Amino acid sequence: MADFDGASQAFLAWLQQSGAEISPKIRLEDLRNKDAGRGVVATQSIPEHELLFRIPRSALLSVETSILSSEIPASTFTHLGPWLSLILTMLYEHFNGPASNWAAYFDVLPTEFNTLMFWTDDELAELQASAVVNKIGKDGADAMFVEHLLPLIEEFADILFAGDVRAKDRAKEMRSPEKLEIMHKMGSLIMAYAFDVEPSMSNTDVDDEGFAEEEEDAALPKGLVPLADMLNADADRCNARLFYEKDCLEMKALKPIKAGEEIFNDYGPLPRSDLLRRYGYITDNYAQYDVVEIPMELVTEIATAAGIWSQKRLEYLDEEEMLDSGYDIAASSPFTLQESLSPEVIILIESLLLSDEEFERLKTKNKLPKPEKMTSKGAEVLHKIVQARIAQYATTLEEDLRTFDQVPAVDAATPKTRRYAMAKAVRIGEKRLLAQTEEALREIIARNGGIAAKRQRDVDEEGDVEMSGLGKKHRV
Ligand SMILES: C[S@@+](CC[C@H](N)C(=O)[O-])C[C@H]1O[C@@H](n2cnc3c(N)ncnc32)[C@H](O)[C@@H]1O
């Protein structure tokens, strides 16, 4: 405890010496009793818009601020891109130990992670058929480190391990699995802690959250923003936001905050599977963003078995940018197919079901079947796909719910059972979405099969059937 609090105090003292301004109305608190590490809490009531802290850009840990950028050619960083550049910079500062300007900061950053990258095979198996298991990317990251970082570490060994006579040997030792793990830890820190940092010239705020994105913002410079990254997140209680000014970054209250309340950032509308992958924790209120993915291979398999697969149609859909490696079913409340089921997968199945004549007619007009209209046959094929997707999970939703007491709820779990509890909550969330989709499709099939006259009424001039009773506009 003393070490933990001592590290927090030393970190805050270093930050203030580095020119940061910190409101006396906030405190860095030990939230380990809630499994939330450190967090920032208000000690007095804070009005909306008030400054919580201001961090000078020079205190950020980034390629721009580390001396490494003046010691190795700038082209090295251009070649590496933002992620690997920041990993290399963090490695350099980490190897510098107490001599690093950011030593006190490293002392409050975690060295152990609950993100999926660090789960054992047994723990990952608890996620069963969740698509997130294929998105962890450990092998890809290993390959990138070996191909891009290790040669640079060897080339610049004398700079990275400055003053060490064993510099060259130490660089070679970085190839060992234990040392590669350090790179994974730096990568994981970036994923959970780094922000996309707009260069000082632009003087604008970056995006809603400011947190580093993966694919979309892969090109934006990344940096670690001390203290801003000590804020935990909450799907419903975000009350602060980082603003990018010319010489500093400012965290401000987005709403009035009462004394004793935690100050929360927003990590974005992430499904719990992704929250687990990137941040290593979940809370129930992220269930509103849950998603289950239907892999394209499964769509192909079922469509082939149904005898409707057509390469020619696929090519047209590809030209129309309708094809994807997977299709989402997202949570909606109340659940409706129109809100939840990816329109692309409906379009895909409906396109495959068209007669040659209808397909040619639409293609000549550069049109596609309308996703808000689904034929009975389309609903039947989608129903088979959803059933097959449900069967990919090793246990049923009912079994998971029945055995709930064997793996406690996430907030009642011990450190030993926590990963199992989180995995179970994620897979239950995905199975619930599949069950809701399966039921909605079953109802459509029953309704259309049972009331032939009504179906006839619903068929419009293009031969489509309205998804009657599912009145919401689709999210896409
Ligand atoms: C940006 S850091 C926030 C500071 C962090 N608590 C610490 O002690 O370093 C993000 C990490 O904080 C934790 N975290 C964030 N929000 C949380 C929450 N609402 N509940 C539990 N843990 C949370 C997760 O481990 C996440 O990977």
Image (cartoon, rainbow, N blue to C red):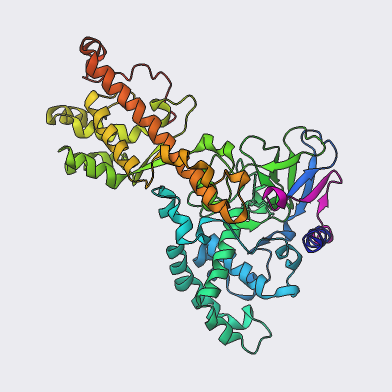
In screen coordinates, is 58 left or right of 335?
Answer: right
Q: Can residue 221 be seen by looking at this rendering?
A: no
Furthest-bottom residue in view? 165
Rendering coords of residue 166 (x, y %): 62, 88
Magenta stretch: includes residue 15: yes
In screen coordinates, is 445 left or right of 129?
Answer: left
Rendering coords of residue 367 (x, y %): 26, 29
Rendering coords of residue 36 (x, y %): 68, 50
Q: Please state, as top left, top right, bottom left or bottom right, where the N terminus lies in the image.
A: bottom right
Image position of 223 with respect to 436: above or below? below
Which span is picked out in magenta? Answer: 14-38
- Report the front residue among 74 and 407: 407
- Report the front residue among 397 and 163: 397
Image position of 187 with respect to 419: above or below? below
Magenta stretch: includes residue 358: no
In screen coordinates, is 291 left or right of 166?
Answer: left
Quadrant of res 308: top left
Image position of 336 with respect to 409: above or below? above
- Report the front residue among 470 and 417: 417
